[in-house]
Amino acid sequence: MFKRILVPFDGSKGGEHALLKAVELATLCGAEINVLTVYRHHSMLEASFSMVRAADPGSMDDAMRSHAREVAEHAKKLAIDAGAPTARAFVKAGQPARTIVRFATEHDCDLIVLGARGMGSVEGYLLGSVSHKVTGLAHMPVLVV
């Protein structure tokens, strides 16, 4: 049925629910789980306000990438602990919805499983959540949990 399932993961409870549902599906199908954490690039102005490490602030992108790596590795461990046959973790920078869909296409993922944003339908429509955008952009099935 499915061979490669992509789970975009941001560390939220909704993301955890989606990850566990993806593991259920992967176990039934023998599919591999690919966890993707996406972080947004910050401008130089935002980087100048760095409050990450006062003694050694580094760049905002480095801090965001490091945090994203921790989130992705945490999700990989959750997936393996929940019984995923195979789980890999990835980190990418970019606009979340487009980066998710591009990654799914480039890695031949045949299903995207992601958490729903907790907004009401009117707010979600006006603001546009990541899950809503992914469902509109993806050329493969998307399961919103």
Image (tube, helix red, strand yellow):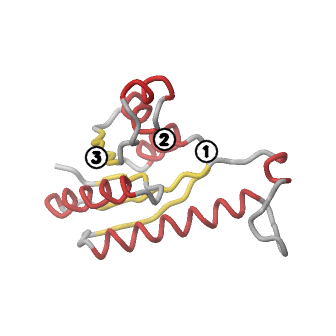
Q: Earlier in the sequence, mark 2 or mark 1?
A: 1
Looking at the rendered image, the disc whose residue lies closer to the viewer, 2 or 1, is 1
Q: Which mark is residue 30?
A: none
Disc 1 packing (10 Å; few <14; some 14–19; many ≥20): few
Name the residue rendered at 36%, 48% in the picture: 115
Q: Which mark is residue 145?
A: 3
Q: Pointer 1: what residue?
A: 94
Q: Give coordinates of residue 114: x percent, y percent.
A: 35, 47
The amino acid type of the residue labelled 2 equals Arg
Q: Give coordinates of residue 33: x percent, y percent.
A: 33, 60
Disc 2 packing (10 Å; few <14; some 14–19; many ≥20): some
With 39 as the anchor, is 47 left or right in this view? right
Name the residue rendered at 27%, 42% in the picture: 143
Q: Which mark is residue 102?
A: 2
Relative to 26, say whether 122 is above or below: above
The amino acid type of the residue labelled 1 equals Gly
Foreground residue among 72 and 104: 72
Q: Quadrant of residue 94?
A: top right
With 43 as the anchor, is 129 left or right in this view? left
